């Protein structure tokens, strides 16, 4: 199907591979961690990861090595690593596979990260719904403790690395790194003001690194094969390595596919994903999870790397590609996403809390054919007053689907409003909508 | 009382964190597993153990959608309705369940076996439409599959159609 070399999915694609410690070791697992403990200094590990050009796989795409480099070296107290396994961006389901099928790969990455930043304790913040994933990770941690890779005196080095699974309880916003820390501290998961950044004031106000599952899974391979090797894959210099992209929507073969960054969306959707399931043409697609603005068929030749997608007016985000066929109402699609964002707004910042409710009500009445003249302008105006005015990036995320559907499919909004104008009784009060 | 029953687990949870309040979500999860919802006595208990005020516990509970503040049915059917599942007809799943069990979203069957909820994204977008029933995922649902899941659960309390460790698409065995 795909001629590209698999890195992260390689083990799990072997027939019969269950992800146990013995199998992982047999496939060369924990060699990178041995090398780090035996032959490398923490600084060398950070340098190697910087050299690899690895960028965070959670959505924001911040360079991982640089993030690690921000951790103060002379800090006397504890430091923490938090692995973000909250995977809650609609359209994204890769971390679930990486955790449930090859848990030791990410645990080895976490052990190396702890060594590099000098952390003794690491938490895996997993979304509460992933009960199976959490139990698989617990079991894997138990195995790794018994194998001497985690726990006290790891591999005889005298260092302690304790890893715990911490389950969330159903809140999208806890995927945002500072909200995740708040939640891990047992509070409402509301994002913090930045600065200060988690690198200096993170969990319990201590230096903390927060990295995504897929980011962690890449680390052992970078150590084994070198930062330079990794930097040569994909779309250097800014988008190195492979990514596990998630394909969903109206396609023949949805699922997780690992490909080098930089292939065009056309190749991903048609060659790898088998194209459209009903052979209707593509109407629109979301390139990187629900937070990423919609793109249209004219963007199919855009390369799947951070810069190219940003140039096209969207973002690569978490790598969740959702494809919609001709005949799908874009007003309806925007409404579905907006209902999600309305439900998940944490309520900390007024523009987002109040704005999301205005947005969803306005789109809802347009979709229900009760729209009014000026509703499109109202939506645009609301969007302008949310984006950039909130503590976290949720504000930008929630307006993306609306602004992009208005940009590319304004006529659909207009047609619905027009219909409403033609059919609604003139002298009647417009009914209040309930959510 | 809850916490004395699970003394060992509570101690294990507390030992993981340098700050007690961090154990709040894990303890609430434990309470909900035991009772099916988070009751007021459980919240008071937890507040005591973690040296918090009951309102501090309550304000946290209400933030997270997974905590039920009222008793629900034995099986909590949660159907994902977010866009990715909606594109592959998740709304029909709700209709099928409603038709079969005669309950609308938010309702519980009179025998307290099933509660139906419609929820936002559960991270299973490539294998939709899907639903979560208590701890388990059921994916790529059809009307027939939903029917079997509901029948099995009502009869045996378990269903073999639940998802195992996730991988999709499954690797093709090389000849």
Image: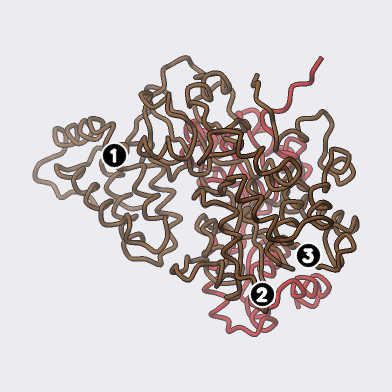
Chain colours: A brown, B red
Quadrant for the N terminus of chain A in the image: top right
Query: Is B128 displayed left or right of A296 in the figure?
Result: right
Mark drawn on residue B42:
2
Front: mark 2 or 3: 3
Question: Where is B66 relative to A281, above or below?
Answer: below
Which chain does the numbered disc 1 sit on? A
The image quadrant that residue B165 belongs to is top right
Q: Earlier in the sequence, mark 1 or mark 3?
A: 3
Q: Are marks 1 and 3 on the same chain?
A: yes
Q: Secondary structure at mark 3?
A: loop
Circle 1 crowding by C-alpha within 10 Å: few under 14, some 14–19, many from 20? some
Front: mark 1 or 3: 3
Q: Residue at x 64, y 35 (%)?
A: B139
Which chain does the numbered disc 3 sit on? A
Question: Residue A337, can we see it?
Answer: yes
Mark drawn on residue A368:
1
């Amino acid at each position: 199907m795909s001629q590209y070399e698999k890195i992260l999915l390689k083990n799990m694609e072997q027939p019969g591979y269950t992800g146990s410690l013995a199998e992982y070791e047999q496939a060369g697992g924990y060699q990178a961690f041995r090398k780090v403990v035996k032959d490398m200094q923490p600084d060398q590990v950070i340098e190697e990861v910087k050299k690899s050009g690895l960028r965070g796989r959670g959505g924001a795409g911040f360079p991982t090595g640089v993030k690690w480099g921000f951790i103060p070296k002379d800090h006397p107290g504890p430091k923490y690593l938090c692995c973000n396994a909250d995977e809650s961006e609609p359209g994204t389901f890769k971390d679930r596979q990486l955790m449930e099928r090859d848990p030791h790969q990410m645990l080895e990455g976490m052990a190396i990260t702890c060594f590099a930043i000098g952390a003794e304790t690491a938490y895996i913040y997993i979304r509460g719904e992933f009960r199976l994933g959490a139990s698989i990770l617990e079991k894997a941690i138990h195995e790794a403790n018994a194998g001497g890779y985690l726990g006290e005196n790891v591999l005889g080095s005298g260092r302690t690395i304790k890893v715990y699974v911490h389950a969330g309880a159903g809140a999208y916003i806890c995927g945002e790194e500072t909200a995740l820390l708040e939640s891990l501290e047992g509070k409402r998961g509301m994002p913090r003001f930045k600065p200060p950044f988690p690198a200096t004031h993170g969990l319990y106000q201590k230096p903390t690194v927060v990295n995504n599952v897929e980011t962690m899974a890449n680390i052992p391979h970078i150590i084994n094969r070198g930062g330079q090797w990794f930097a040569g894959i994909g779309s250097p210099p800014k988008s190195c390595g492979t990514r596990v992209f998630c394909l969903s929507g109206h396609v023949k073969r949805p699922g997780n596919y690992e490909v080098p960054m930089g292939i065009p969306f056309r190749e991903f959707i048609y060659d790898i994903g088998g194209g459209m399931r009903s052979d209707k043409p593509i109407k629109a697609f979301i390139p990187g999870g629900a937070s990423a603005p919609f793109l249209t068929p004219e963007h199919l030749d855009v390369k799947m790397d951070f810069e190219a997608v940003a140039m096209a007016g969207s973002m690569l985000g978490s790598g969740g590609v959702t494809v919609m066929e001709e005949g799908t109402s874009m007003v309806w699609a925007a409404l579905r996403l907006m209902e999600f964002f309305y439900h998940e707004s944490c309520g900390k910042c007024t523009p987002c809390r109040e704005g999301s409710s205005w947005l969803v009500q306005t789109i809802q009445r347009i979709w229900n054919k009760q729209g009014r003249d000026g509703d499109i302008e109202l939506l645009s105006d609301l969007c302008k007053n949310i984006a950039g005015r909130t503590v976290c990036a949720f504000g930008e995320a929630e307006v993306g689907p609306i602004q992009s559907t208005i940009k590319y499919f304004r006529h659909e909004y207009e047609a619905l409003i027009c219909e409403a104008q033609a059919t609604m009784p003139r002298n009647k009060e417009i009914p209040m909508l309930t959510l | 009382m809850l916490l004395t029953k699970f003394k060992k687990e509570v101690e294990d949870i507390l030992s993981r964190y340098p700050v007690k309040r961090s154990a709040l979500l894990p303890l609430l999860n434990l309470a909900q597993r035991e009772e099916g919802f988070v009751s007021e006595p459980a919240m008071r208990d937890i507040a005591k153990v973690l040296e918090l005020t009951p309102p501090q516990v309550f304000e946290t509970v209400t933030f997270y959608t997974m905590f039920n503040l009222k008793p629900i049915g034995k099986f909590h059917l949660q159907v994902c309705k977010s866009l990715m599942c909606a594109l592959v007809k998740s709304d029909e799943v709700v209709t099928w369940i409603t038709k079969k069990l005669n309950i609308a979203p938010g309702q519980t069957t009179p025998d307290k076996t099933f509660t139906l909820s419609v929820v936002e994204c559960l991270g299973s977008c490539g294998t939709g439409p899907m639903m979560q029933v208590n701890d388990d995922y059921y994916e790529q649902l059809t009307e027939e599959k939903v029917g079997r899941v509901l029948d099995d659960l009502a009869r045996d309390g378990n269903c073999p159609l639940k998802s195992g460790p996730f991988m999709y698409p499954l690797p093709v065995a090389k000849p």
